[in-house]
Amino acid sequence: MSDNLVNQPEDPEVEDWSRRQFLIGAGGALAVGAAALAVNSHIGRFFYNLSMPAVQKGLIHVHEADFYFLPNKMTWRVGDRITIKQHNESVSRYHEMQIGRGFDSVQTLLGTQRQQFKTDFWDGVHVTILDAHAVDNLVTHHAIVKCDVSPHPWLLTGPGLGNFSPTLEPGGWVMYEFTVPDKPGIWHYGCFVQGYIHYEEGMKGTIHILPA
Amino acid sequence: MSSIPQTGVDTGRPLTRRYKRMAPVLRGLLWALIGYMVVDMIVAFLDPGPTHSLFNLVSLTFAWVGGVVGWTLGIGTWESVVRPAFGYPMKWKETVGWRRYFEYSTNHKVIGIQYMVSSLGGFIIAGTAAMLMRLQLMDDRMWFFPYSKYYLVTVGIHGTIMMFSVATVFMVGGLGNYLIPMMVGSNTSAFSRLSGVSVWFVPAGILTVAFSPLLGAWTTGWRGYEPLASQDGSGIIYYYLGVFILLMSSLIVAANLVATIVFRRAPGLTWNRLPMYAWGMLAVSFLNLIWIPEIMMTFVMALLDKIVPLPMFQSTGSPLVYLQMFWLFGHPEVYIVVVPALALWMEIIPVMGRKTLFARQWGVIGLVFVMLLSGMVWAHHLFPTQQNATILPFSFFTEMISIPTGFAFMVSIGTMWKSKMRLNTPSILIMMSMFNFLIGGLTGVFLADPAVNMQLHDTFFVVGHFHYTIIGGMVFSSFAAMYYYLPKFSGRMYNEKWAQLGVYWIFLAFNATFFQFFILGLRGMNRWVPVYPAYLRAQNFEVSIFAFLLGFGFLYNIIYIIYVWRRGEKVDENPWQSKTLEWTTSSPPADISFEEIPTVTEGFYDYSDGVSTES
């Protein structure tokens, strides 16, 4: 620097603070920050998917954020035993997770509004709820649900409430276990909260179910 | 740090080197992290809500305060400000060498450069965001960003960081802190310790805004519009907080500059002799002092709307009130950006023209009246929401404000008239800035016409208009100031050929990009959309190419200026033969600028004595 001034440190072997530590530390912090920002970009997704095993079974963590799922791609095999732990990482929004195909839509003044999936993946599937925290509601629809958690005022078993969907409060989680039913093919998952905004802004993913 | 093993090439240094302490920036980051987590956990624990979630809107708001406190203490204020305030002995002493720019300092020249470096960091982050936007707009469908919200939050980050950490900071916090005490013949600024703290708010604010999408994308642009903000991801709370701390920094700068100019002037430096840039800083600081508290309170209210929550700006309150309150500050903000540029024209032109400043009083009157009128025009941003009865007065005042702005042109052109201008990099940049700002200003008068405004509202015409005023006016002037003051900052001189290459490069790329924004706007290109009708694709594609060229042009100039600063040719102390006080010191100035406080006996802009233009 041109304006290095007269005073040198008294002991030439003792420096004030390390330049290398400063550059590596600050550069590293910026790199970590930039990577965090890119998690949900095309690039971030690419690297995330690289780390996924080809076929998943056992415990799978599904993180819900504003407005995306991590992971947003899964591969299951018919007959495998799977436990999903669904976490709502948002600080202010409720999030659900439906799995299905096609859309139930209604016509509104602003155009077609998609409400939920037309075919519910969970129809007739045996599901055991193992753990729950800050669940707003869990609609069982046609799934056959056994709940190990009690009390469970949030468990809604009545008809006409829509597809199977655990809806979590910010910071909540729910863990449920099931055997992948014989429904191979491509299935979609998504969150339809806030009038479809979440789905449209990217809160969706696909599950590829392989035959046994 | 006790010791760090030395590896690699033998440099003749001992194998282990000892360091007295951790790098302050890293300690600041560490303490910020600790402050953030500790406060977050305390608030989350006290949270009466049923979920006791570790991260919720309330805990994240308080955690942010903890983080900023940790950062500010870690950067050096713990030893230098807090402990002495409680009666402990002062162990801190000012660092020397390049390290002083990366920790707390009370020297106004160091603080000025710290402001400029932070501002440059903001310029690069926000400039990168602009490049990503242009990348998306190269095609008429979603291809680069996966979802529209990510495009919109990128627009928001670009605008927010550019406005609050570059446009309002570089020429005021940066050049102002460095130059104003020297221009008025003082060795320190009025509140040097406060100023040493406030400069570190800028990186805190930039990082807060830049990382806000981690909490969820917000789509409101740099304005945080309600009720749009209430539908967005929660990142909007870090927009409010980040801008709040950036504005706090600018508020402290304003108080410091006003006090320095009012109370620290050298003997004989009367108001009539005050340099033009100091007049500009005074006008802009008054604008800051009046309007920044207003917008800070608006952001606090909007934040409370989200985290309490309150209904002030929601459907039961009045979203339109937010719009009014934002632009009540928002338009003076535009003049906070441009007034320093106008003042700089009048500072550099008499020096380069070797001619006495023409109609100096009118120049000062212009700056002051721009300042006064700028508070009376805000609703022209909102014409589509207004009735005729309220549109007309705002339209009138908006067109009126072009008159005092015109005084700056009159003084500059009057000074250039029949002068022997030295056509070097700073004066070329000043003339480019005048050219660009003229286009920006004239399109502004055009937009102030209600009938035109209703058609062009929210189109690229408006985007072209304000980029001509802000980049064209402020950024070009900032580069002029950097080339003009490089010999002062570094004692080194740039090479005219390499500098002019950079300058013509950005001028051509800038006009090729933003002039086409007017045409795009007239052809129907809307703002705030990542996708658009296919017939606009070809022009958008080609505008993006020019925008990338502009980005690289800015990068070239920045890298060249840094290179000259460190390696350029040594030069005389006053290569421009300027008469203002900052040039009477050595270049670069010593820690104490003036061994003896100068006495001023006449104005600084009298070049009628025919001092040689050759050096």
Image (cartoon, coloured by chain):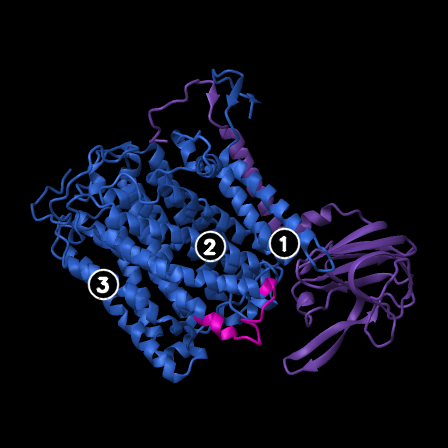
From the top left corner, tell me how far across and down residue A71 is, in percent.
74, 53
Q: Is residue B388 above or below residue B560?
A: below
- Any part of residue B135 in sight: no
**Chain that bears disc 2:** B
Disc 3 marks a residue whose amino acid type is: Gly
Residue B17 seen by the camera? yes
Q: Chain of mark 1?
A: B
Q: Decide: is B98 above or below B371.
A: above
Query: Residue B354 appears at what percent x and percent y?
Result: 14, 48
Magenta part of the chain? B306-324
For the residues labelled 3 and 2, the Cα–Cα distance comes to 29 Å
Residue type indicated by callout 1: Ser
Q: Please tell me whether mark 3 sits on a helix, a strand or a loop.
A: helix
Labels in figure, total: 3
The label on residue B366 is 3
Q: Residue at x 59, y 44 (%)?
A: B35
The residue identified by callout 2 is B161
Q: Are marks 1 and 2 on the same chain?
A: yes
Return the disc, 3 or 1, that comes first in the chain's sequence. Answer: 1
Residue underneath mark 1: B59
Q: Colour of chain A?
A: purple
Gap between marks 1 and 2 measured at Cα: 25 Å
Q: Nearer the viewer, mark 3 or mark 2?
A: 3
Q: Residue at x 43, y 80 (%)?
A: B386
Q: Please name the amino acid that badge 2 sits on.
A: Ile
